[in-house]
Image (cartoon, grey):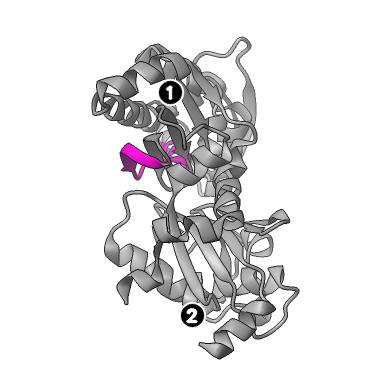
């Protein structure tokens, strides 16, 4: 205990948005200091990270779909939770060392945002990964709560605030009041499913096989949930499924919108179900204040329009939606002594 306290004096307390696609890290008093893909490159058939642990994040993401037979680029997070325990530990250890200037013997307190619907086993995996990566104390905060705070919603007031956080692996829909979640729903349909829907559409329609990075580019550049004022086109490159040779084609935003219809429809249905479970007074507040969108999925063109038409509420996208959850963990970090008794932590199991 004394050693932990001494090491804590030389450690920077951290807030982590441990996302399926990207991991963001903030430090008390400094804000967000790291934003890198949640990807690790390892020697195939092992859990050994390449280049002494440096093939993590941006370096590893550039390898996806382009690795030789001896290397595998792995995304250790799946559907917002840990899919590969050892690789997640290595990734967290790398990020902790990078934030601390690669110093040894650092043991920070860490606030980690997790999906509201994860199981006790999945929570334990987060605790264990963070502790083995070097954290001396781990606190968990629900992602929609962190996103709402990061977006500046008045969650501490006796008034309803509704947040829809669309990440890479999960979509979190929550209604909050008095600094806590009143109603929420977590579905494992989000950005990755949109990418997969685009991949499958091109297979069916064009017999063209593309990778996840290309699907993500299509989604970002011409993806939409409702008709655009001016429809767009994009050149797509991949492998012909019949000849096996490289091929390129042109697709339009109308086609991408058709491909995205199913995952977007599931997100809208989750929002409606959450509203149906709200108490009348909470619903009354939302009729005035509306819905706030965060996460990478919030940037899909026209998604706010579709949600607004379906729910009858005003819908807005948060400022800098990609960093809302991380900024929320930063707020918890700055006020950790006040909030720590309300957060789940490793000491709860003692």
Q: What stretch is highlighted in magenta?
A: 180-200
Report the label total.
2
Report the residue at 32% width, 77% height from top.
Answer: 350
The image shows residue 336, relative to residue 46, as above or below, that is: above
Camera-side residue of 70 and 337? 337
The image shows residue 83, relative to residue 335, as above or below, that is: below
- Give the spatial CA distance, label 1 vs label 2: 44 Å
Q: Is residue 193 left or right of residue 23?
A: left
Instruction: Report which quarter residue 283 is drawn in.
Output: top left
Report the residue at 42% width, 60% height from top.
Answer: 341
The residue that mark 1 highlights is 258
Q: In this view, does 334 lie to the left or right of 349?
A: right
Report the residue at 47% width, 68% height from top.
Answer: 138
Q: Is mark 1 on a helix, strand or loop?
A: helix
Q: Callout 2: 10 Å neighbours few (<14), some, many (20+)?
A: some
Q: What element carries label 2?
A: helix
Q: In this view, does 329 lie to the left or right of 271?
A: right
Labelled pair 1, 2 in contact (Cβ < 8 Å): no
């Amino acid at each position: 205990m004394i050693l932990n306290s001494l090491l804590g004096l030389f450690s920077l307390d951290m807030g982590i948005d441990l996302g399926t696609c990207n991991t963001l890290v903030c430090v008390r008093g400094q804000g967000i200091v790291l934003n890198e893909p949640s990807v690790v490159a390892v020697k195939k058939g092992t859990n050994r990270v390449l280049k002494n642990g440096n093939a993590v994040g941006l370096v590893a993401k550039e390898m996806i779909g382009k690795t030789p037979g001896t290397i595998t680029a792995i995304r250790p997070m799946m559907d917002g939770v840990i899919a590969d325990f050892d690789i997640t530990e290595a990734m967290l250890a790398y990020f902790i060392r990078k934030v601390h200037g690669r110093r040894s013997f650092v043991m920070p307190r860490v606030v980690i945002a997790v999906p509201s619907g994860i199981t006790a086993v999945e929570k334990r995996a987060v605790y264990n990964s963070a502790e083995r990566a070097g954290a001396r104390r781990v606190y968990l905060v629900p992602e929609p709560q962190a996103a709402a705070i990061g977006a500046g919603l008045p969650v501490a007031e006796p008034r309803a605030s509704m947040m829809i956080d669309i990440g890479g692996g999960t979509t979190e829909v929550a209604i909050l009041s008095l600094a806590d979640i009143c109603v929420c729903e977590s579905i494992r349909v989000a950005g990755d499913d949109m990418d997969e829907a685009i991949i499958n559409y091109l297979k069916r329609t064009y017999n063209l096989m593309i990778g996840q990075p290309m699907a993500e580019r299509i989604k970002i550049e011409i993806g939409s949930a409702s008709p655009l004022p001016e429809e767009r086109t994009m050149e797509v490159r991949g492998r012909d499924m019949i000849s096996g040779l490289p091929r390129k084609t042109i697709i339009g935003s109308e086609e991408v919108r058709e491909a995205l219809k199913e995952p977007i429809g599931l997100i809208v249905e989750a929002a409606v179900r959450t509203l149906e479970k709200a108490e009348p007074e909470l619903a009354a507040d939302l009729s005035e204040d509306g819905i706030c969108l965060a996460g990478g999925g919030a940037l899909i063109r026209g998604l706010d329009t579709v949600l607004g038409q379906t729910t009858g509420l005003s819908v807005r996208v948060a400022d800098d939606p990609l960093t809302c959850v991380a900024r929320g963990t930063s707020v918890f970090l700055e006020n950790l002594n006040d909030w720590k008794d309300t957060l789940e932590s490793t000491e709860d199991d003692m």
